Image (tube, rainbow, N blue to C red):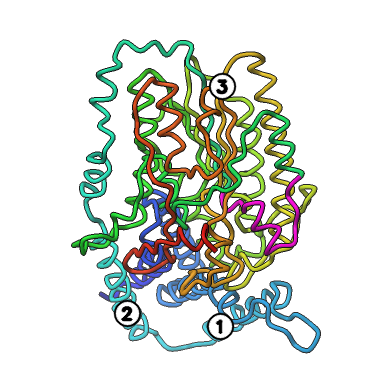
Amino acid sequence: MNKAYSSILLMAIYPILVLVSVNIDEVIFSDAALPLLLSLLVSLLAYLILFKITKNSNKSALFVVISLFFFFYYGHIFHGHFSGKHLGEITIGRHRFFFPLWCSAYFLCCILLIRVRKSLDLLIKFLNYLFLILVISVLIPIFVSLNPLDKIYGEINNSDLDLDFISSKNSNLDVKNKPDIYYIVLDGYASLDTLKDFYEYDNAGFYSSLEKRGFYIADQSTANHSTTYLSLSSSLNMMYMNWLGENGSDRQFKLREIGDSIADNKVAKLLKNNGYSYITFDSGYSSSSRKSSISDLSVSCAAMSEFDRTLIKTTILDPFFAYGGVRAMILCQFESLKNVVYPGSKFIFSHIVAPHPPFVFNSKGGKVGMNSGLNPWKDQKAYSEQLQFINTKVLEVIDDIKSQYGNEEYIMIIQSDHGPASLGTEEMLNPSKELIKERMGILSAYYVPEKIKKRLSKDITPVNTFRLILSEVLGLDIPMLKNESFFTPIGQESLTFDDVTDILHNE
């Protein structure tokens, strides 16, 4: 294995495969295909051009390998060792200082390589075997992680809601005049009490604006689960997800499996079985951007995937893609919600990843400096500013949609999947009672017909949202569940579910 270009091929794919491996639970594998292909093609093209100029295969290959290293590892070094560093009163850990130093180091390496007079055969051979070992070491866990999804689907489909039974006994149901249903999830939106107690921000004005527009505010509602994957899967499948940690499960469930249960959820299946169309939005984030196999229309607002944004952040392109398309994506989602056109009754699901970080809006919608640090939630002021702008966009969407329907009936649920997490680590390990309260308090607002509003309670939780609404809309008898809340740290090998219901309601 002494071909010079072998090291190029292996080095071109290794950094991307590492990123796939590190984020294996969340990666949509098709998202990594284009970066892998581009890296291979550009690297080989650069090698061929350099070889044509230098007539030296070894040096040409080493030029490309060095270039790949400095391209792919800029972000790793900057964010891991320099970002935010201070020298006295000056913040030296900024791209404006680090970028020229990094480029200088690259050019120095290139100059040293030019001055080398040896054949470099042994070095090329060593790099070939080194990169081969590294690539294989990364591919093994990736392939091992490709588990079948039968078990999680089986558990969800065998829950107390039998789709075939429910739909068959209502096969003659007329849905022509059934109301459209909007389910808008604002990621990480804090409750009124959380903002008041921990952020010193009074959000009562927004709640009042919702109530004036006919919304019922479940102001004692809490999240059923503390993370997006679990929360969305719970509300959209109308079941708690704590069974994932019960009975000594014989394997670890991957977050992407739970993500698939969000894309092809039971609420959408039940509505489709009764004549509804299912409209989804590509949020650009793994938890809700998976292509649903049952959606009738998918509205894309993401210029790049979550994997693309994460990859760019590790490369030398990071200083030039500060916002990673996040601003445009969020604005597009709000605008697209106003213009959903599809015949018949519709179930419209949109997961908007805001006010969740990164914080890219001030209270008026202007650009702000990107936040950094080990816990992206830490900047409470930036969070409050972004939340205020999201309030403005939500009210715009509500008013626009209301004007379209006139006196025609429709349903709109605006909820958060969980609250913020500024009072702990990003992984939320060993949470304090204050962090639990911050994370589990949510926004939960319902614009529904009077017959549904009468059945709502101030403490209804998302797991019961569609149990109640579908019972009324489809004339079914779906039992309500006890309102409970489970806290699960992020990034652990096994999922744990701590019942924190008493902490939230009895203290």
- Residue drawn 58% across and 68% down? 434
Dot 3 falls on a residue whose secondary structure is strand
The amino acid type of the residue labelled 2 equals: Leu
Q: How crowded is the residue under tag 2: few (<14 C-alpha within 10 Å), some, or many (20+)?
A: some
Q: Quadrant of residue 25?
A: bottom left
Residue type, label 3? Tyr
Q: Is residue 13 above or below residue 185?
A: below
Q: Nearer the viewer, mark 1 or mark 2?
A: 2
The quarter holding residue 163 reads top left
Could you say where residue 263 lies in the image, as x and y percent from the top left?
39, 40
Residue 254 spot, x, y in % from top left: 32, 57
Q: Are marks 2 and 3 in contact (CB under 8 Å)?
A: no
Residue picked out by circle 2: 130
State the residue position of label 3.
410
Q: Which residue is mark 1?
A: 109
Q: Secondary structure at mark 2?
A: helix
